[in-house]
Image: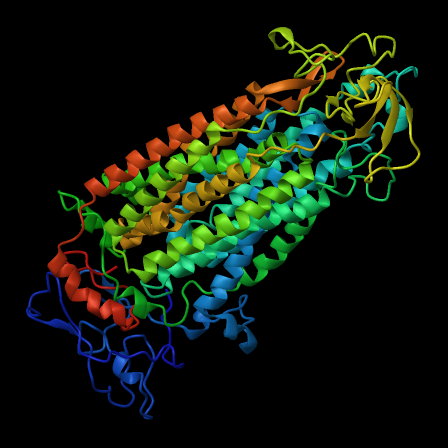
Amino acid sequence: MAMPQNSTGENGFCFAQTLDFSCPSPPPGEAGRTFTAPSGREPSGTPLSNGTASSGVPSPSDSCAEPLCSTTPPEEGTQFGQGIKYVSAEGEELACGWGGFTPGCLQLFNTSKGVLFFLCVASFLQGMTVNGFINTVITSIERRFDLRSYQSGLIASSYDIAACVCLTFVSYFGGNGHKPRWLGWGVLVMGLGSLLFALPHFTTGRYEALSAAEMGVCGENQSLPCAQAASSLSSYRFVFMLGQFLHGMGATPLYTLGVTYLDENVKTNYSPVYIAVFYTAAILGPAAGYLVGGMFLNIYTEIGREVDIAPENTLWVGAWWIGFLGAGAASLLISIPILGYPQRLPGSQRYIVMRVSEAHQLKDGSHKKASDPDFGKTVKDLPRSVLLLLKNPTFIFLCLAGATEATLIAGMSTFGPKFLESQFSLSASEAATFFGYLVVPAGGGGTFLGGFLVNKFKLRCSGIIKLCLLCTVSSLLAIFIFFIHCPNMPMAGVTQMYEGSALPGGHLNLTAACNAECGCLQETYSPVCGSDDVMYYSPCHAGCKRVSENLRNGKKVYHECSCIEKPLLPGPGDAEAGKCTSSCVKKPLLLFFMFVVILFTFLSSIPALTATLRCVSDRQRSFALGIQWIVVRTLGGIPGPIAFGSMIDKSCLLWQDQCGEQGSCYIYQNSAMSRYTLIAGLVYKVLGTTFFIVACLLYKPPPEESAAGSSDASENGNGDPQEHKPSLPAEEDI
């Protein structure tokens, strides 16, 4: 690996004071030698430890260019003591560019802040696509391609399945390889997945939503060919699953190698802030996806074609595919600069050599094996790497706690908009926008605040785990808000009889004396809101005889509806197209506590990630994140959407009927949906609290007296740029 040349001010970084590290197991004849940062310069023309030659011109960086363990210039590749290897440096390998093309203007971005910017853009696009657009368009895709909730849950889980398949390979080999190249190719694959996800729009026929005229009113001859209604569009779910699979493959390096690449190239104290900014971008991505995706859903899916149904109509399908085209193109573009970054940034070695270890101390001392510079570079070390992590109880329970949080996050992010849509009687676009307004301040703010708190109070690993525990308990208390719910808007034949009485046994009965002669079809679902504030399945089921040419509040108005009575006046009433507006008085309370749950859930995310990085050995960080993501996705991300989708399906009151085939759900029972959400939330939050408690109790930090000796130097952020840091007996050199 290349060493940075001392040609810039950043690389010419010197100690302000002499630092003394005891050299472990010195070779014979070198007993008592210490690691000392020299204060003088090498003579002119003397080869320096980084493989370059010193000019005769005095330089402030010369005093930092000598080896830590020797006073004579070492041979290239010579190893001293335990864990120090000198590798010759080629300056061009640390330059930003592609192959031999390394223009000087690009070197302005060859800093930790430059890397952070491009990785933030990549994580923003990933979050906007996978956790934003996909969750926003779930309802529209179900409607367009005749999918059920558990099928859309499988689509959402395909992302995590792909990640599980790739994580071990990527984190193990990528962690010891050229991280920016792994990251760049991953972002490119992610972009291809977005383009593939939008493909079904262009390969299927036009979406023919029944217009108001075709749906007709009472008395018209209505017919709907079953061959047209019962389509095989649900097979396109496999294309969506493949697109999500590519999303998962591409994003795998981003949250394992991307995090460790940032962590390696900044001071230890600043690492939580950098990672928090990175993850905040990943949280703002879904929020932007909800907001922008909600805007796109107000555009009809067949752009340029005029239809006489409004977005509030449940047969409306918005332009769900536009966001994926844009995000896919942007991902392809952003992968280019990421591919140009060097394996390590110039000047990063001074941070690595001064780190203070907080790795969990195993009783048998086997954790010291991971400090060998050659450890983890071959496949034969893979089983030993896994074993070291499995013997670390703090790491294991942090993984399990992350899995419980991931289950709730994955489930609620997938079906959160649908929850709001049902509870508050909103359209799909309104629900997506509403959910975006919740996620932006709560999710993004919580993520950044978590990293800020770790940095502000300079928390060690034990304190970080306690902070995670506090956040989990707070969100556990707030989740009891799901005891309350907004009542369903009354719907004739679904939640109540046409004359207002309750349905016996909850069975549907859409036919009544007032619409018996209308010949209404159950396939044509187009709810209307009567002047009596009761919803009806369609204008025909409301017994409406005539549709007005004039719009009221932008909606069609139906007249002479025999099933609707005018308030205070005799005769048939009117109906407006769309759902009735909910006037739930519990809406502000429900939204506030949902905000609190999201805030404290995301508040613990960066501290938990930081604790994971600190409780394992330095060389195992990338692999540890990979293993953690496997556990999180296997136990949380994959079953989360599927379990939530199945629970939501159980709360369905009215299913789509396609000539005897069951389609997607039209109406959910709000009380059942809240009850299932509460049960799931309580179970997983209690488990998460338990796992954080156990992780805190079992954590065994390094000896305090040893760690304190190195921590002062680490605070300064000063250190010599060496390729590999010394392996000290007490593992104090993170």
Horizontally, is 660 left or right of 241 in the view? right
Q: Nearer the viewer, residue 107 or 531?
A: 531
**How many numbered marks does the figure carry?**
0
Front residue (pair 629, 668):
668
Q: Is residue 143 left or right of residue 733?
A: right
- At 47% from the left and 62% from the top, the residue drawn is 116
Scheme by which the image is coloured: rainbow
Q: Is residue 464 left or right of residue 665?
A: left
Q: Quadrant of the C terminus?
A: bottom left
Residue 373 in view in this figure: yes
Q: Residue at x 51, y 74 (%)?
A: 107
Quadrant for residue 269, please give it: bottom left
Q: Is 568 placed left or right of 732 in the picture? A: right
Residue 466 sits above or below residue 573 on the image: below
- Can you tell which quarter of the image residue 406 is in? top left
Name the spot of residue 220 as percent of width and height, x first.
92, 17
Which residue in the rendered view is the most extreme toward the bottom?
A: 57
* Rendered view: 691 above or below 620: above
Direction front: furthest residue: 568
Q: Is residue 165 above or below residue 79?
A: above
Q: Where is residue 263 drawn, in percent x and y?
A: 37, 59
Q: Nearer the viewer, residue 147 or 288?
A: 288
The percent coordinates of residue 569 (x first, y second) are 84, 22
In the displayed structure, would residue 413 be above or below residue 112?
above
Image x and y of residue 724, in percent = 28, 64
**Residue at point 57%, 20% (across, down):** 651
Do we see residue 186 in this rendering? no
In the rendered view of the protein, which quadrant contains the N terminus? bottom left
